[in-house]
Amino acid sequence: MSRRGRSDAVVVGGGVVGAACALALAELGLEVALVEGREPVRWSADAPDLRVYAFAPDNATLLDELGVWNSVRAARAQAYRRMRVWDASGGGELSFDADMLGRDQLGWIVENNLLVDRLWAALSAAGVKLHCPARVESMEQDIDSTDAGGVRLRLDDGSRLEARLAIAADGADSTLRELAGVQVATHDYRQRGVVAFVETEESNEATAWQRFLPGGPLAFLPFTGGRSSIVWTLPEEEAVRALALDDVAFNRELGNAFEARLGEVRVVSKRAAFPLRRQLAESSNAGKVLLIGDAAHVVHPLAGQGVNLGLRDVARLRDAIADARSRRADWASPHRLARWSRQCRSENAAAAYAFDGINRVFSNDEMHATLLRGLALGVAGKLPPLANMFWRRASGL
Ligand SMILES: Cc1cc2nc3c(=O)[nH]c(=O)nc-3n(C[C@H](O)[C@H](O)[C@H](O)COP(=O)(O)OP(=O)(O)OC[C@H]3O[C@@H](n4cnc5c(N)ncnc54)[C@H](O)[C@@H]3O)c2cc1C
């Protein structure tokens, strides 16, 4: 604890984004506390997490700098080298290849609970003070905008914490965001993402496949052991129906939806479905409370960017604080926090609305939308520099 017995930052929420944030700030030499409501589920090699991420190279670099990427890769991370995107009715096909970008891979498919497990393993060694299981009950912050201003939290285990900054990383239904009075604009897609692991007759070729269908996109992400992880976006009632099908019927419908690109498909795990929404906080900060990850923005999973955007909030915050400290300036000054907040808000809003637009045009079988996406995929497919530009932007390169 620093002067007057308070820490520099308290992070609420220890998912991938919150744990990475706590670690990044501790590595800068700040005194950090982390509050998490549930004991994290330990990763186990023989029980793969159904929630997997297409992890972007810039975020692999972030985790490498935090000293955890090697351990994630050694445990299980499937590199993917290619991506193929095509449309059920508009024609046109887009492909990205690592070779075209001069890279060994486009990214990695990684399980959520493996990332959390490895980040948590590093937290204690970095000196992060853990409060788990504990949830925030109340929050007060000084309106004072000077160095003396801070945030006080009361937890449901009776502890009281005080810090210069409080960081909300407690997910889409963030309590800390609500306590700070930050409003969100939410759009319910009335779609669900059905996830499962499948085996396919043919090799997945270390390729991420995505087919756009009128009900939503269907992605096959390459996983280890010849398996693929699917994210099948379906209208709500369709998703409920797909979950209730027996394995034989599910395999048949999934194979048809995927045009049997990898031959016969066989589901080899349980299935789950997540409701999908777009949600943007009106601001990424309220005084000394900062919002990161899903607490600030929830996006459609079609571009696999949710956790990637959250980790970019973390990298920006780390860089802004490191920059202030290198200039011997106040790292938590209101104008610095407001600048970080504006940058994050504008990048994340642009991404959320771009994915929204893609979902609207592609999850639609009206004629003008069909023509538009055929044209879009056709043009981008025939102009590799354009496709590369999109890819570089999406992957933070
Ligand atoms: C079907 C689907 C597929 C997806 N695929 C991808 C993908 O391929 N790539 C990608 O980048 N993203 C993907 N995402 C999005 C991704 O899951 C989220 O963006 C990501 O989990 C956000 O991380 P987070 O740490 O901000 O929040 P969360 O993972 O929600 O973590 C929040 C943490 O806060 C804790 N918490 C909550 N409330 C409190 C409280 N009051 N006090 C203390 N702790 C609290 C929770 O226990 C949890 O540990 C997908 C999402 C879905 C639904």
Image: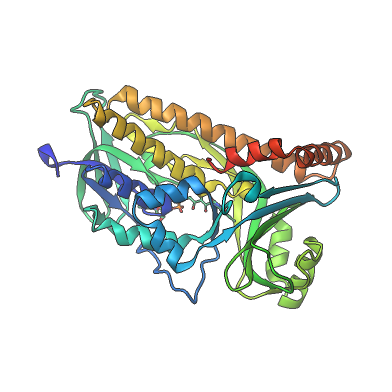
306 and 156: which one is in front?
Answer: 306
Instruction: Judge from the rendering whether residue 5 lies leftward or rightward of residue 282; answer left or right.
Output: left
> In this rendering, is residue 124 above or below 137?
below
Q: Image quarter for residue 318?
A: top left
Instruction: Judge from the rendering whether residue 31 lies leftward or rightward of residue 387; answer left or right.
Output: left
Identify the residue shown where x is 38% and y is 25%.
Answer: 338
Which corner quadrant holds the N terminus? top left
- Asked whether residue 294 appears in the rendered view, the answer is no
> Residue extending furthest left?
4
Instruction: Judge from the rendering whether residue 327 lies leftward or rightward of residue 171; answer left or right.
Output: left
226 and 97: which one is in front?
Answer: 97
Identify the residue shown where x is 64% and y is 50%.
Answer: 99
> Residue extending furthest right?
367
Q: How many marks?
A: 0
Identify the residue shown where x is 26% and y is 36%.
Answer: 140
Q: How is the image coloured?
A: rainbow
218 and 222: which one is in front?
Answer: 222
Looking at the picture, how far across and down is residue 230, in whole percent? Answer: 65, 62
> In this rendering, is residue 156 above or below 336?
below
Looking at the picture, how far across and down is residue 107, in whole percent? Answer: 55, 53
Instruction: Judge from the rendering whether residue 353 lies leftward or rightward of residue 167; answer left or right.
Output: right
Looking at the picture, how far across and down is residue 116, in whole percent? Answer: 40, 59
275 and 219: which one is in front?
Answer: 219
